[in-house]
Image: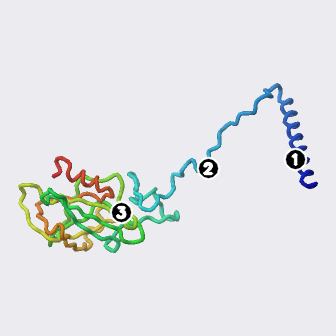
């Protein structure tokens, strides 16, 4: 108890001494207002209030327009200790096909699901060829989204196909081939594509002379809105 009391007295004396010094400084300040505390020149920023511009995006997010690298999150430069998200390939994805009721088979939905434990990115649009076609893949629509389609484990991305339009000459197919691009537009164009049989739900497709495919998108509603927007079907 004596030690505690001695410490308390020392603390009290210290406070009195500090107060005296402050009072003395105020008296020597040349007539400054002694009844108010000085105003700080700036308010300190609370910890965590600002987010650094180079903060990495969490897995599964998408890169924004203007990202010249095409990778998810902020721009990344070689040697900065960051790792770009790899492009998806056949070993990362399971592919399913489906249609819409009351659509008369004029559109096809391609759903890609990432079944690995790492995120990957579906860049640009898929290379689609129908049946035994070995020529150029079908052309893309003007449906480029605002972000590339980066998908984490078990996440999905979608692409839609305009198969035919009413009154066109058509042919029937039961399969198609699917290829994927890297970050560079037009890459892997001549790489062998994976042959995919249409799902039992779809069965076969009636394909017109000018089918078109949308860009990959993680937003199914956005793909549907574009496919069925007035003037596109």
Q: Earlier in the sequence, mark 3 or mark 2?
A: 2
**Residue sitting at 87 percent across and 37 percent down?**
21
Q: Which residue appears at 22% of the width and 66% of the height?
A: 97
Report the residue marked by disc 3.
183
Residue pointed to by mark 2: 47
Q: Badge 3: few (under 14), some or many (20 or more) residues near its Cα, within 10 Å? A: some
Where residue 199 sits in the image (x, y, percent)?
A: 20, 70
Foreground residue among 179 and 68: 179
Q: Residue at 22% of width from left, 55% of height from top?
A: 141
Which residue is situated farthest in the top direction here?
31
Separation of marks 3 and 1 at Cα, in angstroms: 67 Å
Which of the two discs, 3 and 1, sits closer to the camera? 1
Name which residue lies at 24% across and 69% down: 178
Indicate whether 192 appears above or below 216: below
Judged from the image, the secondary structure of the residue bearing numbered disc 2 is loop
User: Which residue is labeled 1 in the image?
Assistant: 11
Which quarter of the figure is the N terminus placed in?
bottom right
Label 1 or label 2, whichever lies nearer to me, is 1
- The reply to whether the C-beta atoms of the residues labelled 3 and 2 are less than 8 Å apart is no
Across and down, in percent, residue 33 comes to 78, 26
Above or below residue 103? Residue 20 is above
Q: x, y (%) of residue 142?
A: 24, 52
Locate residue 127 relative to residue 56 in the image: left or right: left
- Position of 86 with respect to 225 (left or right) is right
Question: Which circle marks residue 182 in the picture?
Answer: none
- Near mark 1 (Cα within 10 A), the count class, few <14, some 14-19 or many ≥20, is few
């Amino acid at each position: 108890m004596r030690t505690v009391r001695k410490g308390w007295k020392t603390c009290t004396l210290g406070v009195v001494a500090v107060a005296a010094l402050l009072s003395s400084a105020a008296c020597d300040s040349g007539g400054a207002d002694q009844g108010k505390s000085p105003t700080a020149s700036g308010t300190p920023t609370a910890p965590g209030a600002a987010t650094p511009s180079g903060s990495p995006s969490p897995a599964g997010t998408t890169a924004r327009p203007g990202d010249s690298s095409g990778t998810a999150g902020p721009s990344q430069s070689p040697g900065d200790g960051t790792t770009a998200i790899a492009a998806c390939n056949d070993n990362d994805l399971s592919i399913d096909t489906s249609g819409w009721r009351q659509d008369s088979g004029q559109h096809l939905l391609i759903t890609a699901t990432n079944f690995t434990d790492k995120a990957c990115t579906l860049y640009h649009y898929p290379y689609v060829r129908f049946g035994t076609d070995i020529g150029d893949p079908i052309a893309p629509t003007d449906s480029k989204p605002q972000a590339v389609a980066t998908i984490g484990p078990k996440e999905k991305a979608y692409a839609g196909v305009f198969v035919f339009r009413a009154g066109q000459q058509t042919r029937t197919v039961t399969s198609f081939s699917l290829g994927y691009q890297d970050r560079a537009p037009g890459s892997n164009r001549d790489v062998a594509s994976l042959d995919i049989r249409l799902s039992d739900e779809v069965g076969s497709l009636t394909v017109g002379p000018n089918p078109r495919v949308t860009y990959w998108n993680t937003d199914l509603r956005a793909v549907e809105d574009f496919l069925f927007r007035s003037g596109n079907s």
